[in-house]
């Protein structure tokens, strides 16, 4: 049972690794689809909790896969999920890093400008999926809107925004 | 951006770091990087250690944004690899991922034990709502230049991708297998 879970963790995240265009956040909707709807490793509410925990931890956003792996299959699951999510894309990045000096000209420019709208669409989908999962009431929606406006309007350490939202949550307003 | 003007493109000011220095730098970037590691990696690699010029950093980061997978993880692999080969990549990667892996594993253990507490759940929902807002706000900033598109083809591709993944919840790899070639073909025709 546990071995099967590890294999499935590895398979899902290795595939996702190569399709996360625009960074780890681009794959958040797919992570939720797989973890909640396909594999039933957790409820949608638990996924939202793990997403929030990943924001609280230092380090790159990709660390959410460690939490998903842990929830699915313990410490070994955390390790397998993290390695699977980083492995394929790292090998690809290493190879491209070697040849990137030669990648100039029209084809490369077309690839870049073709991928940009895709990655923006994926990141918007991430924000939307998490926002809908967290939108238990009007106050939660307001928190999302307020955070979005605040971060586009001015530079502010996100931890302040998280702290305010956490307090609202503890005060049972969300 | 300001030091781009003050230091024209040239070799970085410092000699190439050793494997240990590489590991320590990326571990520090990782541990300082709350809510996004990009700003910290730039500060460390360009300003403090001066292992890269601002131009090199911008070029590497632009490349990493278009590679699949986590951006800063890709940056560590490419930077480590350029300086110390495959071992450099591995060391930079373990420096970046190792410390948060340990911290997050402890968090996961705590969550498994205390995750059912109602106040904690509400707190995490609040943080998730705020974090989703930050993602959407950053995304809006990225999307603004797309709106200058005369035939609105790029915004349409972004919208179709959003609908397929965010609303229809179609599998990521099948959706992208279709959307990526179309989007690149459009960009190629319009070049």
Image: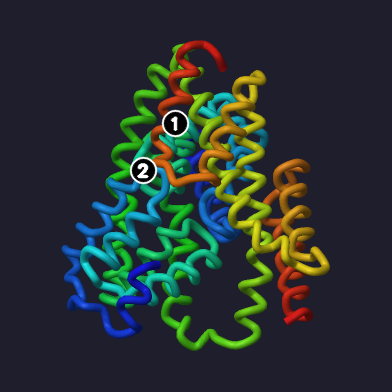
Eyeballing the image, is A117 above or below A27?
below
Q: Nearer the viewer, residue A97 or B52?
A: B52
Q: Secondary structure at mark 1?
A: helix
The local crowd at label 2, few if under 14, some if 14 to 19, many if 20 or more residues have their Cα within 10 Å, is many
Residue B29 % position (x, y): 29, 53
Residue A101 % position (x, y): 46, 85
Q: Chain of mark 2?
A: B
The local crowd at label 1, few if under 14, some if 14 to 19, many if 20 or more residues have their Cα within 10 Å, is many
Whether residue A2 is visible here, answered yes or no, is: yes
Question: What separation in Å lies between label 2 and label 1 (alpha carbons)?
Answer: 11 Å
Q: Which residue is mark 2?
A: B34
**Residue B107, image quadrant:** top left
Q: Chain of mark 1?
A: A
- For the residues beneath circles 2 and 1, the answer to whether they share a chain is no
Whether residue A78 is visible here, answered yes or no, is: no
Q: Which residue is mark 1?
A: A162
């Amino acid at each position: 049972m546990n071995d099967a879970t590890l294999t499935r963790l590895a398979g899902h995240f290795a595939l996702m690794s190569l399709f996360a265009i625009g960074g780890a956040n681009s794959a958040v909707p797919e992570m939720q689809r797989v973890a909640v709807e396909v594999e039933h490793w957790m409820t949608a509410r638990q996924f939202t909790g793990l997403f929030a925990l990943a924001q609280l931890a230092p380090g790159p956003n990709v660390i959410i896969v460690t939490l998903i792996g842990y929830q699915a299959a313990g410490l070994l699951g955390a390790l397998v999920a993290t390695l699977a999510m980083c492995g394929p894309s790292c090998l690809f990045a290493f190879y491209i890093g070697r040849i990137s000096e030669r990648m100039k000209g029209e084809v490369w420019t077309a690839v870049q400008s073709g991928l940009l709208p895709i990655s923006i669409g994926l990141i918007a989908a991430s924000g939307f999926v998490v926002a809908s999962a967290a939108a238990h009431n009007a106050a939660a929606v307001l928190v999302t809107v307020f955070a979005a406006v605040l971060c586009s309007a001015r530079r502010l350490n996100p931890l302040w925004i998280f702290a305010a939202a956490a307090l609202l949550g503890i005060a049972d307003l969300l | 951006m300001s030091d781009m003007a003050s230091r024209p493109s040239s070799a970085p000011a410092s000699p190439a770091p050793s494997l240990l220095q590489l590991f320590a730098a990326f571990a520090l970037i990782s541990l300082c990087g709350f809510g996004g590691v990009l700003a910290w990696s730039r500060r460390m690699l360009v300003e403090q250690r001066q292992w890269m010029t601002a131009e090199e950093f911008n070029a590497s980061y632009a490349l990493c944004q278009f590679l699949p997978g986590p951006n800063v993880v890709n940056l560590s692999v490419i930077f480590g690899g350029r300086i110390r080969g495959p071992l450099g990549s591995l060391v930079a990667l373990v420096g970046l991922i190792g410390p948060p892996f340990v911290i997050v594993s402890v968090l996961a253990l705590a969550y498994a034990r205390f995750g059912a507490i109602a106040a904690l759940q509400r707190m995490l929902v609040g943080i998730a709502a705020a974090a989703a807002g930050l993602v959407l706000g950053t995304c809006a900033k990225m999307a603004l230049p797309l709106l200058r598109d005369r035939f609105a083809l790029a915004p349409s591709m972004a919208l179709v991708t959003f609908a397929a993944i965010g609303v229809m919840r179609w599998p990521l790899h099948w959706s992208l297998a279709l959307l990526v070639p179309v989007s690149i073909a459009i960009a190629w025709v319009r070049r």
